[in-house]
Amino acid sequence: MLTIALGLAFPGAYSEAQQQPEQPAQEAPPGFQNLQVLPMDIDRRELMNYMKGFAMGLGVRCWYCHKGEGDDLSKFDFAADEKRTKAAARVMLRMVKAINEDHLSKVPREKDAAPVTVMCATCHRGQPRPEVAPLAPPPRAPQTAPSQP
Ligand code: HEC
Ligand code: HEC
């Protein structure tokens, strides 16, 4: 069972702006060949929701992870494993699954509290590489000089 909440509550902004009914070529071709984390029999719509969640969460377009250019998705090779970023996203998918299923599911919470799931946007917040900026850096003692060899 794969229960990764990826924050797909956005109103389909990405696809609806681009797709037109008379242009099905804008859609990725049906039938998936190379899913290693998501289930191979995943529903097309569900897969696309994941992909849009990735793109929105990281503030990127499809080509950031997939072989292809621009907006004409019919020319993309989505199954290809050419890009480092796609491989990184697979690591992330497994990580998010583990966080939600193995850890957050075990958090003792108050009876009425709804579980909060982690999604791409939780860390990425619209950026490919999460920014790590401490809110208030703790005061630091001066570094001691490294001892001479
Ligand atoms: C952050 C990286 C990332 C972004 C952005 C992304 N994808 Fe993906 N995509 C992946 C990964 C990773 C997989 C493989 C998942 C797996 O192995 O289970 C995948 C798989 C796919 C597949 C299945 C290919 C196959 O046959 O195996 C399609 C189709 C696809 N993506 C379409 C899209 C579209 C369309 C977009 C833009 C809206 C998009 N992706 C954006 C990472 C990304
Ligand atoms: C718990 C926080 C967290 C979550 C959740 C998370 N990421 Fe990441 N992600 C990171 C961190 C931190 C890095 C930087 C790792 C490094 O290179 O040191 C990263 C790096 C990446 C990269 C590589 C970026 C680059 O160009 O080097 C991709 C792609 C990515 N994440 C995709 C995803 C996707 C897709 C999801 C949702 C399935 C996701 N991440 C969820 C923390 C997170």
Image (cartoon, rainbow, N blue to C red):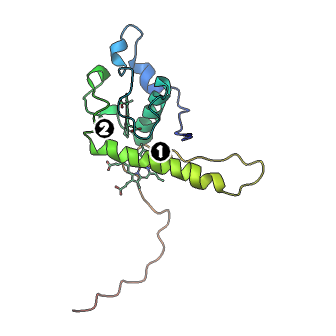
Q: Can residue 99 be seen in the rendering of this structure?
A: yes
Q: Position of residue 28 (x, y in %)?
A: 36, 22
Q: Position of residue 94 (x, y in %)?
A: 46, 48
Q: Is the residue 67 above or below the residue 88 in the image?
A: above
Q: Residue 149 occupies which quadrant of the picture?
A: bottom left
Query: Type of residue at label 2?
Result: Tyr
Q: Which residue has dot 1 on it?
A: 120
Q: Which residue has dot 2 on it?
A: 64
Is ligand 2 within 8 Å of the beta carbon of the residue shown at mark 1? yes
Identified at 57% across, 40% down, the residue is 3
Query: Type of residue at label 1?
Result: Cys
Q: Is the residue 60 above or below the residue 43 in the image?
A: below
Q: Position of residue 43 (x, y in %)?
A: 49, 25
Q: Residues within 10 Å of mark 2 (few under 14, many from 20)?
A: some
Is 123 on the left or on the right of 73, as rendered?
A: right
Is ligand 1 within 8 Å of the beta carbon of the residue shown at mark 2? yes
Q: Residue 52 occupies which quadrant of the picture?
A: top left
Identified at 25% across, 29% down, the residue is 68
Identified at 46% across, 24% down, the residue is 44
Name the secondary structure under disc 1: helix
Q: Is the residue 65 above or below the residue 43 in the image?
A: below
What is the C-alpha distance between the residues marked 2 and 1?
15 Å
Is 131 on the left or on the right of 84, as rendered?
A: right
